[in-house]
Amino acid sequence: MTLHDEMVTMGQRALAASRALALLGARRKNGILQTMADQLISDSPLIQQKNAADMEAGRQAGLSVALLDRLQLTSARIEAMAQGLRNVAALPDPIGRTIRRWTRPSGGVRPSGGVRPSGGVRPSGLQIVKRRVPIGVIGIIYESRPNVTADAAALCFKTSNAVILRGGKEAARSNGAIVQAMTTGGVRKGLPADAIQFIQTCDHDAIRELVQLEGLVDLVIPRGGEALIRTVMENARVPVIKHYKGVCHVFVDQSADLDMALAIIENAKCQRPGVCNAIEKVLIHEAIAASFLPRMAERLQARGVELRGDEAARRIVPALHTAAEADWTTEYLDLILAVRIVPSVKAAAEHINRYGSHHSDAIVATSATAQKIFTDEVDSACVYVNASTRFTDGGEFGMGAEIGISTDKLHARGPMGLEELTTYKYVIHGTGQVRM
């Protein structure tokens, strides 16, 4: 069987599973999620064994410290994955929920205002309900972080979507073990066969085949580096929701509490520098740059951060490396930070809109005027006031877990939880009406 035939077969099985999933009630699905979580804990030793093999292969391949951190599964991280499944189980099920309900006027009744609609539209008396339903079959393509496997499978299952998972080769053993644990636990409680499928091959052609399964796959969500996402977009024949990269900023306004600004910047850059919601740039208002930048440089350099600055920043702290034009659009995913001095909050917003990736950007300010200008003018999925960008995460937003973070503007934007994995349909009840 060719790779194309294998992928078509996988898509057909997922489609059949999606129809079975649509018939499962919320209580049944929640019980299955709880059993999946229990099985992850039971299989933790095996998952860590497989992960250790992935970690060793990653070291041999020269993965950075930040990427190895994304790859590693400790007992605590596996417990967090299991808790994520339990959190999803505890969330309200959006499937079947009524979004809106209305009744058209009956015959002989004109709409409010007494004016009959133009175009020959007549009162019908139809009862119309707009209702949430599953998308169907979702393909998830992702790279080093194996916890995405559990999050993606749980959210897709909760919303009655079948899922086809394709992780990166760096985590192939770990991902396989996670899927095996979840399906083993889930099947015992009634998980439909093929509801969660994992593409075993590391052949890159599998991605192209997956994103071209028209009629079988309804949506693809890529999570990973810019190169992966561009590959998906260039080959896709099915809809895609994505973000290319996370070029996130903190702007320190002249009204900022400087101690707060230091704490936020350190957290946003250093807590986990290899993730998409870590900041890559800091913009500083020129009125406080001379007092703030030396303190920030000292604090971050103590954490091993390499700082690159524009000419104005280097005049204040000459030890900064020179920032090139490319630095303003680069997602480092490492302990590197570019710094620019700007004359105003409007200038900061203009810089972010020009160079940023519309992901997550923050202002530190006590001025309500500065806060409003920033939140009104920065065109990003998540805009923060006096908080770290590291909170851009489905779990932190109360979604239980997330399927990804979208910088698109259609259908979904920002962290994608349960509602973003649904679509809707109209259910119309009549009493024999025919259109005149």
Image (spheres, helix red, strand yellow):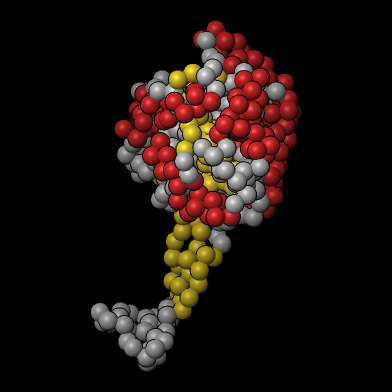
Nearer to the camera, 403 or 278: 278
On screen, 123 above or below 381? below
Residue 53 is situated, as x and y percent measured from the top left of the image, at 61, 13
Work out whether residue 343 can be spotted: yes
Question: Total label count?
Answer: 0
Q: Is residue 287 above or below residue 112?
A: above
Q: Quadrant where the C terminus lies?
A: bottom left
Q: Which image quarter: residue 202?
A: top left
Could you say which quadrant of the image residue 64 lies in?
top right
Q: Residue at x 27, y 81 (%)?
A: 118
Q: Residue furthest left?
A: 119
Residue 347 drawn above or below residue 245: below
On the rendered structure, is 90 left or right of 143? right
Q: Position of residue 214 (x, y in %)?
A: 34, 41
Q: Residue at x 65, y 34 (%)?
A: 262
Query: Is 105 placed left or right of 59 in the picture?
Result: left
Foreground pick, 413 / 126:
413
Query: Would you identify the image quadrant in which residue 49 lies?
Result: top right
Rendering coords of residue 12 (x, y %): 42, 39
Instruction: Choose between 97 and 55: the one closer to the eye.
Output: 55
The N terminus is located in which quarter? top left
Spot occupied by residue 106 in the image (x, y as percentages of width and height) = 41, 86
Residue depicted at x 53% and y 47%: 383
